[in-house]
Amino acid sequence: MKKIFSLFLLTGLLLTSCSDFLDLTPQGQENSGNYMNTEENAIKVINGIYDILSQTEGRGPDGDWMDHHYDFMLASIATDDAVKGSNLPDMPQLIDLEDYRLQQGSSLATAFWIHGFWGVSRSNYAIKNLPDATIPENLKNRLLGESYFLRAYHYIYLLRHFGGVPLFSAPLNPSDFGKTVRATLHETFEFINADLRQSIELLPERSTYPAADMGRATKGAARAFLAKSLMYQIGVDAECEHTWNDVYNLTLAIINSGEYSLVPNFALLFEYENKNSSESIFEIQAADGTASDAPASVGNAYPLFQGNRESNTGANTGWGFHNPTQNLVDAFNPSDPRLSSTVYGIGFNNEILYGVQMKFNRTEQGSNYLNRKAALPFKPSLDKAANKNILIMRYADVLLIHAEAAYHTGKEVEARQYLNMVRERARNSSYCKGYVSGSPDGYTMPVTTPDVPNVNVSGTALLDAILHERRLELAMESNRMWDLVRTGKLVDTVSKAKDTDLIGNEGRTDVEVRHEGIANRIRNHAFTGKDNTVIPVLPIPLDEVQNWGLEQNPNY
């Protein structure tokens, strides 16, 4: 199949809802340039781009089945934070992804590719047709801002998985087929950055949205994603001319906007009922619905994919993927309340989840732990369509980016200030909801003050503390890979955690699997970036390589 070409021709308007603000009647395929001449239709087009964010396993735009394609598959499972999980034979391609053995022709890599370009194609339809739409100018500008933001979002997704990719700023014509070259990593970054700057100009602040539109892209979200894009680019792109001062100014603007604040209790952040909190800068919306699969589903399969495979009263049952590692657990001070909101499982807190002692089957897990941030206290009526949002960008992340930018611009006092804001919140938080047996809804405070003191160090020790805090605070939230890559620590860190530290685990099913020789495999399927950073990439689908004349990624 000519996947990119098919996506851009078939983008149509097959629109469904994925939250209250997307709760609109699905539309049939439509290619008319004047379709967006009514406010209702224009909004539906943009809602159709958001809809892709929550879609995972299911029919793609061409009708073919697509594998799961969560961010955490590469961003977490292929790092020291998590393992594949489930039982050993389940989803073998995900084993290959974790082990850096994924091969050309992988349907998993193809799903990543399709998902990203599907979002780009829908965004381009909107960006082309909105300017001429006969709708109020303020609404038109906002919808354009959302479209640019969402195109950037999907290109970030593609860049992280494949490196530089073909760049499309408009829908394709049949005469365009096969004529777009693959952009460089630098060019792809700059395309993303331009879209996000356009979004900053066009989008309103969060506080101006009515409640029914909560969850849409905002000026703060565009600034946060641009800051994160620049932070990554500064670390890996040898042609990058941006500086940490650019990152600093973006995060300072978010802080000074007064639009966001840390939720006082970390434990509240990941419960299904606490959507779009004061800390949320961008999250994928979900709601209860009557369909399990895309495109009609309004929920998501996020809790199902990561839930305990053993059935238990008072908790969701799932497929057992994306298991936190012992290495991650050991990175926390045992008294840090955030650990209880990050993991649950065998040997942790008497196996209690939501006030009930759980049963686990170690042969159905890849480690002793499961992802607490994805847990639910009940089984959804539709397994693959849970009413639980997915936090993508939150204020604590911005504060830590700001701390790092302050460090790199010589403002160590300010760096410590914002780092310690995050640590202070952790120190004053409760354990996770239902931490104590018999109290499924309770938030129990630690008896003694957690050992999460303020950081008072300087120099490289301060930078190390900021990066370590990012690991703890944002664990299992699809950030770890990109922090390791941009700081040049990926190969050594992952090799130690998944290889040398696990010597002796070969052939056992009760411990984490050793990935012998993983360092060489990471380097084998990677580009070399700025300062010899190792940038791992997945194989581009073979038919895309052939039909578009694209250069395949290294050693696939």
Image: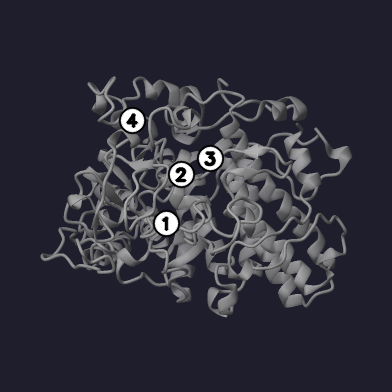
- Which residue is denoted by mark 1 in the rendering? 379
Q: Position of residue 344 (x, y in %)?
A: 27, 50
Mark 3 → mark 1, Cα distance in angstroms: 44 Å
Vertical order, 202 against 552 (above or below): below
Badge 1 marks a residue whose secondary structure is: loop
Q: How would you rate the neighbour count of disc 1 (Cα within 10 Å): few for under 14, some for 14-19, many for 20 or more?
A: some
Q: In the rendered image, which residue does mark 3 sit on? A: 237
Q: Which amino acid does label 1 sit on?
A: Lys
> How far apart, in angstroms, are the residues tagged by discs 4 and 2?
20 Å
- Type of amino acid at the residue the image marks with label 4: Asp
For disc 3, the neighbor class at 10 Å (few under 14, some 14 to 19, many from 20) is many
* Camera-side mark, 1 or 2: 1
Nearer to us of marks 3 and 1 is 1
Classify 10 Å Cα crowding around label 2: few (below 14), some (14-19), many (20 and above).
some
Which numbered disc, 4 or 3, marks the residue that appears first in the sequence? 3
Provide the residue designation for mark 2.
72
Q: Quadrant of the N terminus?
A: top right
The three-letter amino acid code for the residue at tag 3 is: Asp
Residue under label 4: 492
Q: In which quarter of the image is the C terminus?
A: top right
**Left or right placement of residue 260 versus residue 146 in this view:** left
The Cα atoms of the two marked residues, 4 and 1, are separated by: 40 Å
Instruction: Choose between 26 and 46: the one closer to the eye.
Output: 26
CA gap between label 4 and label 3 equals: 20 Å
> Can residue 195 be seen here?
no
Q: Do tag 4 and tag 1 residues touch (Cβ < 8 Å)?
A: no
Which callout, 4 or 1, points to the residue nearer the camera? 1
